[in-house]
Amino acid sequence: MNYKIVRLNTRIKSSKTSSVLIIYTGGTLGMAYDESGSLVPFNFGQILEKIPILSNMDIAITVISFPEPIDSSNVSMHHWKDMAYIITENYDSYDGFVVLHGTDTMAYSASMLSYMLHGLNKPVIFTGAQLPISAMRSDARENLMTSLEIATAQIDDYPIVPEVCIFFNHMLLRGNRAKKVQSVHFDAFESENYPNLAESGIVIDYNTAAIRPYESHRKLVNLNDLDNRVMVLKLFPGITEKVMDACFAIEGLKGVVLETYGSGNSPSEAWFMKSLERAIKKGLIILNVSQCNGGRVIQGRYETSKELLAVGVVSGADMTTEAAVTKLMFLLGQEKDTEEIRRKLTIPIAGEMTT
């Protein structure tokens, strides 16, 4: 892929200058209005004109842009592989990484990269904006500036946040715990089941107890074998046996994220349980997550969820749907043994769940 590379001419002031690689994939943050009033991709070679204060930061900044910026609604597996490849290939050359990404699927991408970048020991901060960088009231400037600061923040020469995160509207969230919850407000993301990693105000207040600690022995490995033969099935009152069986009969399907009610509950009718049981017996992996933003699946708490446990549905505990579907895709690509996949779905591999 022919990436576009721009090195920004910031006023580097010391020999200990930090370095950040910005990866621009697309999204609102990198858009600007043209003469006709239409939104078009922004030329990052001119970003210092839009955000002059960047020139005064003691950070060496390089921007790598996808050849064609993508709407995040079009993000797919090969884009995740591209992001992970860029980070892996440039890992030793930069102190941290900022990924500019559309908000609609940012939580999916952040979740997937948290699994793919095994052994990550540097900050990878996803951010974006609700308004384009050229808009008067844009949130792009604050989100980008603070993400750069977090990506280079260190204590005793070690990064403060050595994991994949999302920074948005003053909040730093673990990437695989975040969820987009707003389309018209600046506070677009939340993390109901895990504490915020930091909050930016006059200073950035880090919640160090919630951040994965730096481990000097960790070595980065790009695990990029993925399998997208999965689906999400959301339960609703009135769902029928024909719908269930038709979903489970999709050719080549390997895994299903089943969005259940409350703490993991589902209909208790015999046909429903038999449909699940047939699917599992033929090798399908079914992972149970809650439709609620907060809380967790506790299979066996109520009578209906006891039956899910009995037929072999795997509990997703407190994972978000975004973290669950990407974890399923990741493990299906990494493992061949169904029982091993089922086992790893129940344990955290990148801080995505609480056991």
Image (tube, helix red, strand yellow):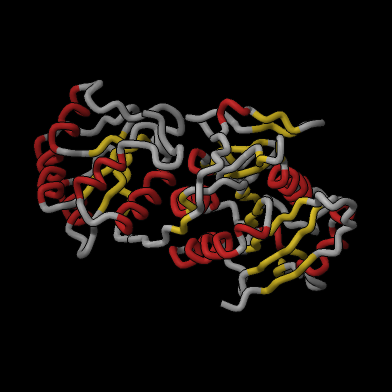
Determine whether, in the image, residue 131 is placed left or right of residue 190: right
| Residue at 55% over, 60% down | 88
Residue 258 sits in which quadrant? Answer: top left
Determine whether, in the image, residue 272 is placed left or right of residue 343: left
Q: Quadrant of the C terminus?
A: top left
Q: Is residue 37 visible?
A: no
Q: How many marks?
A: 0
| Residue at 60% over, 44% down | 166
Q: At which x and y percent is residue 116?
A: 45, 54
The one of 354 and 128 positioned closer to us in this rendering: 354
Q: At which x and y percent is residue 157?
A: 71, 40
Farthest residue to the bottom: give it: 2
Q: Is residue 42 visible?
A: yes
Q: Is residue 193 above or below residue 127?
A: above
Determine whether, in the image, residue 226 is placed left or right of residue 41: left
Q: Is residue 167 above or below residue 27?
A: above
Q: Is residue 298 above or below residue 222?
A: above
| Residue at 67% over, 67% down | 64
Farthest residue to the front: give it: 217
The one of 330 and 137 positioned closer to us in this rendering: 330
| Residue at 29% over, 38% down | 288
Q: Is residue 187 above or below residue 134?
A: above
Determine whether, in the image, residue 130 is placed left or right of residue 189: right
The one of 272 and 68 positioned closer to us in this rendering: 68
Q: At which x and y percent is residue 35?
A: 82, 72
Q: At which x and y percent is residue 108?
A: 48, 51
Q: Quadrant of the N terminus?
A: bottom right
